[in-house]
Amino acid sequence: RSRRTSEGGIFLSGTTVRSLERDIEAYFVKCLKDINVMTRKAKWLGYDGCPDRFVLACGGIWVELKAPGKKPRANQITAMAQFSLAGAQVRLIDSYGGVDELVNYIINEKKIYATSLPKIDNQQDNHES
């Protein structure tokens, strides 16, 4: 049996396995889908370091995802600062708890209730983790 730990790892029969960025991203996509909020994986042509994901809620939120304990590279810090200075919301998330905080923020800002919304299909994002 497995379960998440508060440190962002996965507990397996007495052993903690560190989560990878793709694990955090898969959880991120699932949680947003559960509250009927779309997210898109960003692909940047000719510009390295831009945030990984764009969330279509609360005026748009750019999200850089990292494995727990991993720090953004210098070019990622620069890109996040540029986006923020331009007025964009930017988040750095490196844990399941960070995903949960963003989901709670979106729910509170949008005053949405996951059970009352029609489901949207984020199917095209499933292969992009």
Image (cartoon, rainbow, N blue to C red):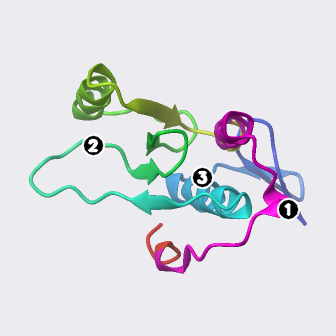
Position of residue 48 in the picture relative to residue 70 (left or right):
left
Q: In the rendered image, which residue does mark 3 sit on? A: 24
Query: Residue 105 colored magenta?
Result: yes
Q: Quadrant of the N terminus?
A: bottom right
Mark 2 or 3, which is nearer the eye?
2
Q: In the rendered image, which residue does mark 1 sit on? A: 115
Q: Residue at x 37, y 33 (%)?
A: 72
Residue 71 seen in the current view: no
Give the SS element for disc 2: loop
User: What amino acid type is highlighted by mark number 3?
Assistant: Ile
Q: Quadrant of residue 83?
A: top left
Q: Position of residue 111 (x, y in %)?
A: 75, 40
Q: Crowding at label 1, few (<14), some or many (≥20) Cα neighbours within 10 Å?
A: few
Q: Position of residue 6 (x, y in %)?
A: 79, 37
Query: Marks 2 and 3, Cα distance to the nearest angstrom?
Result: 18 Å
Q: Position of residue 121 (x, y in %)?
A: 59, 77
Q: Crowding at label 2, few (<14), some or many (≥20) Cα neighbours within 10 Å?
A: many
Give the SS element for disc 3: helix
Earlier-in-chain disc, 1 versus 3 = 3
Q: Residue at x 51, y 52 (%)?
A: 21
101 or 35, nearer to the observer: 35
Position of residue 70 in the picture relative to residue 121 (left or right):
left
- Residue 4 to residue 122: above or below: above
Q: In the rendered image, which residue does mark 2 sit on? A: 50
User: What amino acid type is highlighted by mark number 1?
Assistant: Thr
